[in-house]
Image (tube, rainbow, N blue to C red):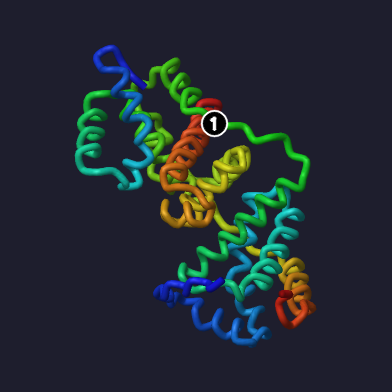
Amino acid sequence: MTVPKRANRKKIKDKDFELIRAINSGQFDRFPELVKRYEQKLYNFSLRMCRDATDAEDTVQEIFLNVFRYLKDFRYEAKFKNWLYRVAASTCIKKRRKSKFAPERELSLDEFISQDEAEGPNQVPNWALMPLDKLLNDELLDKINQAIFSLPEKYRLVIVLRDIEGFSTAETGQILNLSAANVKVRLHRARLFLRDKLKGYFEDA
Amino acid sequence: MHNDEHDHKHCLKLFDRLSEYLDNELDDVTCTDIEKHVKECVPCFVCLQTLKRTIDLCKQTENRPVPKAFSKKLKEVIQNMPKTPSP
């Protein structure tokens, strides 16, 4: 059977192109450069996805081992960073499946709607009006991190990639193998969930 | 979310699209529809503003530095890997 010739797609020459090409052409001693370039990003991504710092460290190590293992399959058809996060997200998802977590909860739009209806807000609260730099402090940042962490994983992955890592809807869809519509639904629910946590925090303060 | 003067179904329909609106991912007609609606519907305006602030806050979360001990360990693991990726 003849294998159809692969379509000659344009290679994306991003800032990692030369380094990846060098590693893939046999300069494996340059792999630590790639680790240095992305270890902080992946460490923080893993901290947001894992139970604790030890788990995050194990995950980062596993991500880089997977990157080393599969780098030869990278076709330069996407930005390397996007491919890297695809490996990272899939490592996190697989790791979770191996552990004994309870099944994930679905977030429904109704739970956010009914809360708003019950409260009937009639003015914008102070926390949404104050200048951001006046509002921010360590306690609040801690609260936001806790709120992000309390999201079910599939929503957390989307909000971390979109609002923290800065990937577009299309890129997030490619990283997680989701349609753009699905990314948007999960992102909206994740944001509403966080908004409710923040509302609770400011109302209790 | 809604008040008596507004069509509740319309509020719900727009509530669904608020993130897309804030991300500039909607067509002009829907954007205009949302902008017109939030000018008249206070609960929807509040909802939009608090959602926007939530996104702004989320973007402010800081990255922690990699612990030095872990960075060193990671370097060692990488250096001790087989020099060619497994097939």
The image quarter in which residue A73 lies = bottom right
The image quarter in which residue B36 lies = top left
Q: Name which residue lies at 53% across and 50% down.
A: A160
Residue A134 in sight: no
Q: Quadrant of the N terminus of chain A?
A: bottom right
Expressed as whole percent of the image width and height from the top left, the position of residue A169 reads 42, 51
Give the residue number, with chain letter if any, for mark 1.
Answer: A107
SS under mark 1: loop
Expressed as whole percent of the image width and height from the top left, the position of residue A24 reads 60, 82
Residue A145 in sight: yes
Is B29 above or below relative to A61? above
Expressed as whole percent of the image width and height from the top left, the position of residue A125 reads 40, 29
A58 to the left or right of A44: right
Q: Disc 1 marks which amino acid?
A: Leu
Viewer-proximal residue, A37 or A126?
A: A37
Q: Quadrant of the C terminus of chain A?
A: top right
Q: Name which residue lies at 41% across and 40% down.
A: B53
How many C-alpha atoms fall within 10 Å of the one at disc 1: few (<14), some, or many (≥20)?
some
Expressed as whole percent of the image width and height from the top left, the position of residue A83 reads 54, 65
B36 to the left or right of B72: left
